[in-house]
Image (cartoon, rainbow, N blue to C red):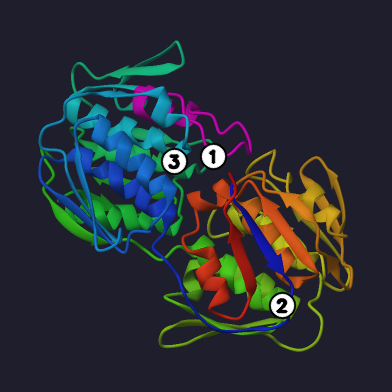
């Protein structure tokens, strides 16, 4: 099992290219199931989760080819051979449940295992089921699988979500593209990944309006055609690498970044004493002057502060001047990185959904263990700012969401290496 060794060595300077969004690409890939014609995605990230989704689509009979060193995915679902998403693949990744809506819409049936992924909370399928049932699906849970069918086809309806779930919005939106009549999703998620999916579906012939707002309207069509679509920039990778010069000092330019992808996050960085400037190529990030200031953070659905940047922000707050409170309102089990940061000398107290962080002048390198995807990179960030060596173990989590971490951070001056272990 590989580990990553980080040695704190001062300011970072240079350029970091930001990949296409993992969460967007994992949503766009199942959209191929909606059409018999080819769907091609460019700017795809090269991650283990993409490989898992590839295996899942191939198990259903879709053709998926990885081109140009993995940055182009050419897919075709002209001859699907199965409507069963098997547990052995689905258990590895939460986003696997996004084949449910497309298969139900095109094939009229789907059998999908309950999903897996990082152990950061329950993340139930209730909203997905509620929305698809509103469109006329009949869904039953048997032996860990959702058995869904739509014997009379899906029909447009008004679907009101009790929570602005990204996954449920995506599943319902894809299903509604082939439903008869008009579907309105109320309290829909507003994330950039939703808009990116809507853009792709429109290129395939779908009629969608209102994406990026709480009300999305979809007018069903008889069929969708092929398309080519560029995956949006990964705002979570962007935010993560923006924190590298914030925590270490120096100035780094993030290629492909835009403030509009991370407005609330950028506001918090500004309050903490971090300067973010838009350039022709992306975003330039540096400290304004002196030590970072403590700021309070509450995670919220977009356009609020992203839950996927909470762990990384906590790493920054560990060396900030003052005390900050981070409140996690999305997932109930997302402070598992806190005890590992404490091993490095951080002062953190966790009470339920709140973590109180009192900044220290310097963290100390230590052996730590990654517990989930975002926690793993938060420990690497902390290691960059710590005295001595930090060894982060169980970094297989990292490969699910960040491509070439060592190469990208080394390129701006970080002392970091991956250790292959048997």
Element at badge 1? loop
Q: Which mark is residue 163?
A: 1
Question: Which type of secondary structure does the marked residue at label 3 adopt?
Answer: helix
Above or below for 163 versus 136: below
Residue 388, how many percent across, how many down? 80, 69
Report the mark closest to the observer, 1 or 3: 3
Q: State the CA–CA distance, disc 2 to disc 1.
A: 37 Å
Residue 96 bears which disc, if any?
A: none
Tag 2 near tag 3, CB within 8 Å: no
Neighbours of disc 1 within 10 Å: few (<14), some (14-19), many (20+):
some
Give the residue at mark 2: 248
Which of the image's four quarters has the N terminus? top right
Q: Residues within 10 Å of mark 3 (few under 14, many from 20)?
A: many
| Numbered range of the magenta stretch | 112-133
Q: In this view of the protein, which residue sits in the foreground, 341 or 166?
A: 341
Residue 210 location, x and y as percent? 34, 55
Residue 129 part of the magenta segment: yes
Q: Is residue 326 left or right of residue 421?
A: right
C-alpha separation, residue under disc 1 versus residue under disc 3: 11 Å
Question: Residue 167: which numbered mark, if any?
Answer: 3
Res. 179 in view? yes
Residue located at (70% from left, 63% from top): 313
Question: Residue 386: which quarter of the image?
Answer: bottom right
The answer to whether 110 appears left or right of 391 in the picture is left
User: Between 61 and 284, which is closer to the camera in this rendering?
Assistant: 61
State the SS at label 2: helix
């Amino acid at each position: 099992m590989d580990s990553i060794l980080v040695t704190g060595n001062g300011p970072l300077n240079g350029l970091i290219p930001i990949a296409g969004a993992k969460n967007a690409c994992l949503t766009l890939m199942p959209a191929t199931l909606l059409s018999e014609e080819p769907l091609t995605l460019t700017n795809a990230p090269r991650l283990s989760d993409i490989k898992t989704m590839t295996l899942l689509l191939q198990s259903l009979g879709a053709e998926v080819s990885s081109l140009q060193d993995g940055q182009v995915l050419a897919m075709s679902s002209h001859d699907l051979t199965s409507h069963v998403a098997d547990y052995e693949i689905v258990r590895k990744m939460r986003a696997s449940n996004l084949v449910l809506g497309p298969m139900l819409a095109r094939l009229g049936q789907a059998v999908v295992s309950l999903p897996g992924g990082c152990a950061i909370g329950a993340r139930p399928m209730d909203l997905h089921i509620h929305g698809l049932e509103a469109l006329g699906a009949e869904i039953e849970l048997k032996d860990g699988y959702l058995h869904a069918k739509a014997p009379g086809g899906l029909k447009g309806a008004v679907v009101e979500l009790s929570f602005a779930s990204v996954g449920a919005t995506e599943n319902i939106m894809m299903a509604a593209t082939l439903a008869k009549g008009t579907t309105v999703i109320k309290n829909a998620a507003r994330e950039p990944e939703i808009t990116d999916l809507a853009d792709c579906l429109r290129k395939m012939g779908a009629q969608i309006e209102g994406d990026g707002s709480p009300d999305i309207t979809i007018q069903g069509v008889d069929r969708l055609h092929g398309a080519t679509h560029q995956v949006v920039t990964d705002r979570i990778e962007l935010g993560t690498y923006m924190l590298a010069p914030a925590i270490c000092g120096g100035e780094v330019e993030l290629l492909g970044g835009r403030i509009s992808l991370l407005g609330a996050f950028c506001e918090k960085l500004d309050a903490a004493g971090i300067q973010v400037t838009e350039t022709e190529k992306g975003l330039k990030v540096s400290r304004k002057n002196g030590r970072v200031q403590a700021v309070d953070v509450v995670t919220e659905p977009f356009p609020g502060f992203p839950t996927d940047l909470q762990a990384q922000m906590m790493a920054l707050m560990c060396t900030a001047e003052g005390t900050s409170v981070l409140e996690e309102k999305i997932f109930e089990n997302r402070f598992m990185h806190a005890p590992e940061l404490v091993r490095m000398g951080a002062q953190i107290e966790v009470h339920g959904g709140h973590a109180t962080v009192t900044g220290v002048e310097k963290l100390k390198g230590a052996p730590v263990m990654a517990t989930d995807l975002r926690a793993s990179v938060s420990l690497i960030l902390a290691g960059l700012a710590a005295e001595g060596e930090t060894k982060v173990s169980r970094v297989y989590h990292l490969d699910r969401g960040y491509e070439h971490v060592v190469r990208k951070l080394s390129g701006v001056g970080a002392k970091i290496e991956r250790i292959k272990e048997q």
